[in-house]
Image (tube, rainbow, N blue to C red):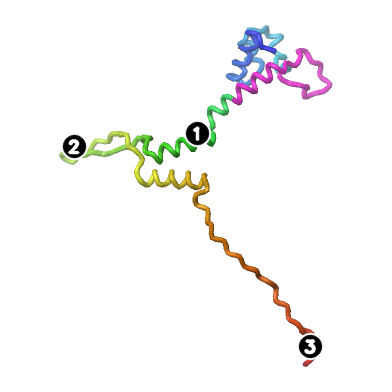
């Protein structure tokens, strides 16, 4: 079931405020309705003896969860993004900003920023991390050894010879 305009405004405002009451007010609900807007998001009320004023709205709850997941996925780099970045560093396609100090004569110097491509050390580190990810550095030498526990036959005989 699709959300109406006011419910969409509520979802957007809830993401912004993190609370149901101000979100409901911002979406245009009356204060008496906004006071119980949190009930739209709860399948069961925390206090089971409390009387429900507003019905649970699973579609509103789902829309809020989907929006929060979208925001979360935009903030956190996934494995594919990390691999793409390491590959671009390895290939020298990225630029980083560094500060350089230049002498301008008479004992004076000026600091300025400039763009720099990854140096050999940075590219090597990216290659190493990518190699580890793809299992290129697995030690293929395997040593087989059978270690047994020594058993002394006739051990009781040595004890009785005393």
Quadrant location of residue 57? top right
**Magenta residues, start to end:** 41-69
Distance Cα–Cα, label 3 vs label 1: 72 Å
**Residue 6 colored magenta?**
no
Which dot, 2 or 3, sits closer to the camera?
A: 3
Distance Cα–Cα, label 1 vs label 2: 42 Å
In the image shown, does 12 or 32 lie closer to the viewer?
12
Residue under label 3, please give it. Answer: 157
Residue under label 1, please give it. Answer: 81
Q: Could you say which disc has been placed on residue 13 in the image?
A: none
Distance Cα–Cα, label 2 vs label 3: 95 Å
Disc 2 element: strand
Q: At which x and y percent is residue 40?
A: 72, 16
Q: At which x and y percent is residue 97?
A: 35, 35
Q: Where, quadrant-wise, is the N terminus in this rendering?
A: top right
**Residue 58 colored magenta?**
yes
Q: Residue at x 71, y 19 (%)?
A: 41
Mark 3 touching mark 1, by CB under 8 A? Answer: no
**Residue extending farthest bottom:** 162
Q: Residue at x 80, y 23 (%)?
A: 47
* 54 in relation to 103, above or below: above
Tag 3 or tag 2, which sits nearer the N-term? Answer: 2
Describe residue 81's horizontal placement relative to residue 162 as left or right: left
Residue under label 2, please give it. Answer: 104
Describe residue 136's horizontal placement relative to residue 95 as left or right: right
């Amino acid at each position: 079931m699709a959300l109406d305009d006011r419910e969409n405004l509520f979802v957007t405002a809830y993401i912004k405020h993190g609370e149901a009451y101000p979100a409901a007010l911002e979406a245009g609900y009356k204060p008496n309705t906004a006071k119980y807007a949190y009930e739209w998001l709860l399948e069961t009320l925390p206090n089971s003896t409390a009387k429900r004023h507003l019905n649970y709205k699973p579609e509103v709850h789902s829309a809020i969860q989907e929006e929060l997941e979208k925001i979360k996925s935009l903030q956190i780099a996934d494995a594919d993004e990390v691999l793409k970045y390491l590959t671009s560093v390895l290939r020298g396609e990225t630029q980083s900003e560094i500060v350089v100090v230049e002498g301008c004569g008479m004992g004076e110097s000026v600091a300025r920023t400039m763009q720099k491509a990854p140096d050999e050390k940075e590219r090597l580190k990216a290659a190493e991390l990518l190699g580890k990810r793809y299992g290129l550095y697995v030690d293929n030498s395997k040593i087989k050894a059978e270690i047994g526990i020594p058993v002394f036959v006739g051990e009781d005989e040595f004890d009785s010879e005393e």
